[in-house]
Image (cartoon, rainbow, N blue to C red):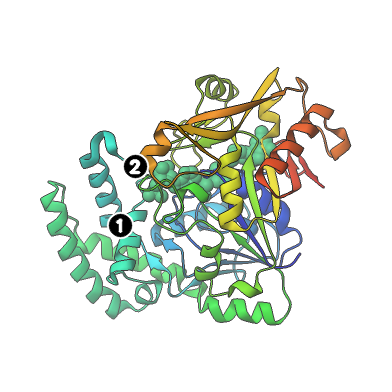
Amino acid sequence: MANTILIGAQWGDEGKGKIIDVLTEDADVVVRTQGGNNAGHTVLIKAQKFVLHLVPSGILRKGKVCVIGNGVVVDPVSLVSEMEGLRKLGVKYKGNLFLSETAHLVFPYHRELDAQRETLQGKNKIGTTKRGIGPAYGDKAARTGLRVLDLIQPDRFKQKLELKIKENNEVLKAFGAKPLLFKNVHEEYRAAGDYLKPFVANTVVLLHEAVRKGKDILFEGAQGTFLDIDHGTYPFVTSSNTTAGGACTGSGIPPHRMDRVVGVMKAYTTRVGEGPLPTENAEVADMLHAMGREFGATTGRPRRCGWFDAVATRHACMVNGIDELAVTNIDGLDSLASIKVCIGYRCDTKRYEFVPNDTEALNRCEPVYAEFPGWEASTSSARKWKDLPPRTRSYLKALAELTGAKLAIASVGPGREQTIVL
Ligand code: GDP
Ligand code: IMO
Ligand code: MG
């Protein structure tokens, strides 16, 4: 399969988990390289639904090696609970799951600060998942974070945590929030540290050994291009590099060892949280929500929905170097008589063919639409390209052409088998 970076080409929740699960069949190793448990990747296997937050989605296929890389921020208590949940569902990970010793840790004070900052922002809030992601990456950048290495060394951990709790309690007090009790946090994290210790590894060395042996590695992106800290709709973004480059820095595998980039996108657009969404449309949202779709896998919040935005996906293609496209949720548009696609933005007197960097300008952008005839037929049982209605095929070809990459996968349902590989 070659070394493949898989990224979200929109605002997250594109169906990365499902496509990862499909591609893992041909991979040896699956690596998460950024983000934390703000991610929620859904995989449906027969009738069983799995939602993965920190554990790579590849864990659901027997014998695949899964790695939580150095670029991920890890809430160890949450990770243990996720692993235990998987174990109870019969998923085996002993000997197959590895956690980077240099991944940074998320603590309760990060979550509390995340929530307090959001409250303080009021109507300007980001709409975070409140998982402490921003403050944890903040500590990492400020060089004051604690890492997995610290967690598994009891004396060192105790010393460092004591200081951090002291410092952060002062900040929490300033917000008028309840200070944390060192003893409680320490006990909980030490227990998680003991549980996780057998999984901790130098994952950079481990991954390079895999490369040397010619193994195929799949890099599982979290979030999406427009949530990238550098390339997204700042400040309405997450705190990591969700674009293809993040796979290199978050794993220690250099760019020239990567063979291809797969961009996952929905056949329409969704976003959860605040920030610009040029093609947002209430009718599209009502239709999808009425079908019981588009509720967040991590927070349960209803996702904002709109038409496919080809300006955005073209931009995503550029910054990620996308070679191949996986288009998901095609079946979500089955009932429509007519489908709109945004092919340009109009802002004041300007016309944009790319996403402007100024979020305020983007907020003022009006989409310029092209209209496509709907297929008004169920696609969910299609298994081959020729099973799709001609109008669906034309629509997908247009999305690929407008985005500027090759259509490789078409997904017509959440199940493994509801996948058309071109
Ligand atoms: P991720 O974060 O990118 O992995 O995406 P999420 O799992 O958060 O959200 C995608 C949702 O779409 C999940 O509920 C998936 O089960 C579902 N899904 C993925 N592909 C398809 C598809 O082609 N059709 C339908 N109906 N659902 C899909
Ligand atoms: P997956 O991997 C969709 C969004 C939040 C918020 C912003 C910042 O499932 O695609 P954060 O908690 O990261 O500080 O929140 O980013 N967000 C996501 N939206 N899918 C995700 O992950 C997301 N992870 C974060 O809603 O707008
Ligand atoms: Mg998700």
Q: Secondary structure at mark 2?
A: loop
Compared to residue 50, the image places residue 245 above or below, namely below
Q: Is residue 383 visible?
A: yes
Q: Position of residue 76 (x, y in %)?
A: 40, 62
Q: Earlier in the sequence, mark 2 or mark 1?
A: 2
Which residue sits at x=56%, y=82%?
205
The image quarter in which residue 395 lies: top right
- Answer left or right for 357 relative to 421: left
Q: Residue at x 63, y 47 (%)?
A: 264
Q: Helix or strand or loop: what does disc 1 sit on?
A: helix
Give the quadrant of residue 207: bottom right
The residue singled out by tag 1 in the image is: 135
Q: Nearer the viewer, residue 278 or 81?
A: 278
Q: Which residue is mark 2?
A: 126
- Residue 41 in sight from this viewpoint: no
- In the picture provided, is 407 more to the left or to the right than 155? right
